[in-house]
Image (cartoon, helix red, strand yellow):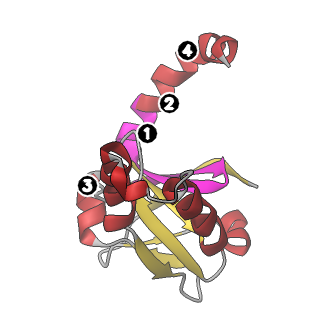
Amino acid sequence: MLIGEYIHTIDEKNRISLPVKFRKELGKKIIITPGLDQCLFIFTAGEWKKVSKRLSDTDADLSFLKADKRNFNRFMFGRAVEVEVDTIGRILIPDFLKERIKLTDKAAIIGVEDRVEIWNDKTWLQYREVVEKQADQLAEKL
């Protein structure tokens, strides 16, 4: 299970070191894709297969017939990249994904059970503050 919150520096080559606790669980090849709420999602290869199946699965197996499915699949799959974790646990974040969430010199790396999220550190702190104030109401809705 991927859990925890870490703030890491992004080097001049767009590399970021994954938390040690995440490295074994993620493996050597990961998928980075645009996420929701202004973050990036990181999936293991196995988890990405599960997500892919769920996103493309319909009763008739013709997910391309529904506009909402087509649009969301383009969003998730069209800008997804397979990335290798180097020998010291760093990953390279492509410029187009880095720009999407306005990453500069620091990033928040968040473990969210079956995925890792990468956030602009300032955006994450603002988001976390809002959600923490709503935690009781959110729990009640669940």
The answer to whether one can see residue 7 in this image is no
- Which amino acid, by three-letter code, is at mark 4? Gln
Which structural element holds mark 2? helix
Name which quarter of the figure residue 54 lies in: bottom right
Which structural element holds mark 3? helix
Name which quarter of the figure residue 99 lies in: bottom left
Q: Residue sitting at 35 percent across and 53 percent down?
A: 65
Number of labels in the image equals 4
Q: Is residue 124 left or right of residue 14?
A: right
Badge 1 density bin: few <14, some 14–19, many ≥20, Cα 10 Å: many
Residue 124: mark in rendering: 1
Q: Position of residue 116 (x, y in %)?
A: 57, 56
Badge 2 density bin: few <14, some 14–19, many ≥20, Cα 10 Å: few
Residue at the spot of label 2: 128
Residue 118 is one of the magenta-drawn residues: yes
Q: Alpha carbon of mark 2 to alpha carbon of mark 3: how far? A: 19 Å
Q: Residue sitting at 41 percent across and 43 percent down?
A: 36
Question: Relative to 49, is 62 above or below?
Answer: above
User: Going from the N terminus, do you reach mark 4 or mark 1 first?
Assistant: 1
- Which amino acid, by three-letter code, is at mark 3? Arg
Is the stretch drawn in magenta largely helix, strand or loop?
A: strand
- Which amino acid, by three-letter code, is at mark 2? Arg
Q: Is residue 11 left or right of residue 133?
A: left
- Which amino acid, by three-letter code, is at mark 1? Trp
Residue at the spot of label 4: 134
